[in-house]
Amino acid sequence: MINDTQMDSGEKLQWECKAMGRPRPTYHWLRNGLPLTSQGRMEIVNGELIIHRVQQTDSGMYQCVAGNKYGSINSNAELKILASAPVFVHNPVRVIATLGKDILLECKPKASPKPRITWKRGDRRIQQSRRIMLLRNNTLRIVNSSRADEGNYVCRAENELGSAEMTAVLWVKEAMRVELSPIRVEVTVGESVVLSCKAAHDTSLDVAFQWFFNQRPINFQQDGNHFEYIQTVRARQSSTVDLMIRSILLKHAGKYGCRAQTSADTVFTESELLVRGPPGPPGVVIVEEITDITATLSWTCGLDNHSPISTYNIQARSPFSLGWQTVKTDPDPVTGDMESAMAVELNPWVEYEFRVVASNAIGTGDPSAPSRGVRSKEAVPKVAPSNVSGGNGRRHELVISWEPISEEFQNGEGFGYIVAFRANGTRGWKERMVTSADSTTYKYRDETFPPLTPFEVKVGVYNNKGDGPFSKEVIIRSAEGEPREAPSDVKAYSFSSSEIRVTWKPPNPGPGRPRGYELSYWKDMEQEDLGKKQRTLKNETSMVLTGLEGNSLYLITVKAFNSIGEGPATAAVTVNTRRAPPAQPPTNLMWIQEGNNVTLNWDPVKAKDNESDVIGYMVLLKQEGKGHNQVTRTINPSTMLSLPEGGTYIIEVRALSEGGEGAVSSQVRIVTSSGVRAKSNQCSVHCMPQSLTWTALLLVLLVPLASW
């Protein structure tokens, strides 16, 4: 495989063509489609093409062909030969050097073939010496420069196609001196400091500054909360910039560098910032030994951050703690020269992690990494149950309850409770074992003791290591009995065809305290077992029975109940529900309007023999889209209504009776708009008073009412 190649004239071309095959392939070369042979500057040997001192006439498309009796393959490439007179891209060149430093004056013309290079200063060709020498790349080197070296240096490049010259103008300036102060400064976390960088330089040169932190440029946009670049102060022969470091953190300790740069030279100098702060985290914490209530710990000290460590604080964490908590230690305090201590007053049989925090005069540092988790040894329980109480339950039961002991204070495996009790005033304790650590209740049943018998009760704890303490003794009574007496003074009266109100007085106090009351009610001529029952929500002494049949005789009993059972029922009281309200709604509704007032009339409702007598009427006025309703009661079959504002109004009428509200009339819908006034279509104009002045007509729609 050969590739396109571009060369200067006079250089050597070497292309190698290789192919694989059996039998071994033979090679031949073509240029622009014509075969090549070895002659003059050209050699062809075993597939390799060599052209010495290439010329422009050698340019063209080359092809290597490899073949045997089974076929052939080829590879193509283009050869371009460059030829141009010397040209300098930059001319003249301005060079500013520092006094006493070495100077390099480069001469890099573009030319093909490569040109011959000569240097001269003024009209005289430069002769090489120990201080001035021409390097292989045509660069002129001047060692240990001085003011006398200032001037114009001319580089001449020449080949057979032409020549060109480049002038290098050399100025030699005094070396720049840079001072960074202070060289070393020590501050405390949270403080601020200013570093000043002053550069003394040649007055003809401009200087640029850049600040570094630990060899890396400071990004003032990203770190603007802590670093501020204070602009250059330019004097006659010096320039000064400041770096303010504010609200210093530990991470800001290190080397701060100032780089001053002119077109002649660059100077870099550094200052060291030491930051005093809280200690760094201690090293790995190891649990050397653990008992039921102590743990011996060791650690390695961390960085003191330029302020000696004064004390160590040991913290512990368990599944029962709210995060990390400081634990008591032996010795107390743990001083800064120590690397071990004992954590004391731990809880037995608890999984702990430990960590250590160091403090110095500046503050408290970050904690160490947590130790591996370790479990303290088992021990006898030390905490007794609290809030021992009881009561309720079933007849002949003693119910004892308590708050369970947290796993943190169970102190070992096999944890349970010992429930001890005895009748008040007796000697021997009855003890029962409750093996579940989560249990909160124990029930003891004995048919021999009466309700509300007082007992002395205490609850203790135990585990595989032994028995722990008991709680304080408390008095708990056994369960009460069911109510012994029936309520008294039961009264019932009907206030509608479907509702009866019942009242009573509670029974006399006794062992069976009522928790509520149950009412049973049934119609005359029905069996009591088929009746209905309702219970009060609490110890209420009245109830309203609803959903009853009108004009019917009901029997009602009341009895008290509690968690144990029901007491005896009262004797049945009887009461008649009132007759049903009229089923016939008001009809023939007529109305007229004058201004904002509507006069409404209807035919009186006559009750049937089995219905309650009519004692009046109820008129409902409501405006569509509004939630407010206006109710008017009247004993006459007429009324006057006031329409508050324009809109659509609905009017409904019901008869009122001792049995309740009767059926609703058809709806009267009045649609009003500006300048409109009318009458209903049930009434002719002759039914209205002649003295009224009519200005408009209102539409009335009679719509059946579904419900109120």
Image (spheres, rainbow, N blue to C red):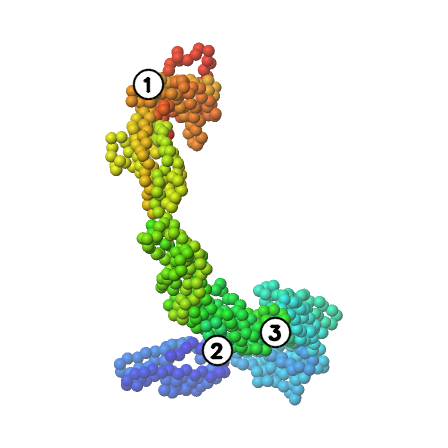
**How dense is the environment of label 3, judged by Cα within 10 Å: few (below 14), some, or many (20 and up)?**
some
Going from N to C along the chain, the mark reached first, 2 or 3, is 2
Q: Estimate the x, y position of residue 450 in percent, counting from the top left.
A: 35, 50
Taking depth in this image into account, of 6 and 43 the one nearest to the observer is: 6
Taking depth in this image into account, of 345 and 295 the one nearest to the observer is: 345
Relative placement, left or right, of 162 versus 455 is: right
Mark 1 lies on residue: 606
Going from N to C along the chain, the mark reached first, 1 or 2, is 2
- What's under tag 1, amino acid-wise? Lys
The residue sitting at 46% across, 85% down in the picture is: 52
- What's under tag 3, amino acid-wise? Ser
Which mark, residue 310? 3
Real-space Cα separation, disc 1 to disc 2, in angstroms:
103 Å
Q: Estimate the x, y position of residue 109 in percent, counting from the top left.
A: 57, 77
The residue sitting at 59% across, 67% down in the picture is: 219
Q: Element type at marker 2?
A: strand
Mark 2 lies on residue: 288
Q: Are marks 2 and 3 in contact (CB under 8 Å)?
A: no
Real-space Cα separation, disc 3 to disc 1, in angstroms:
104 Å
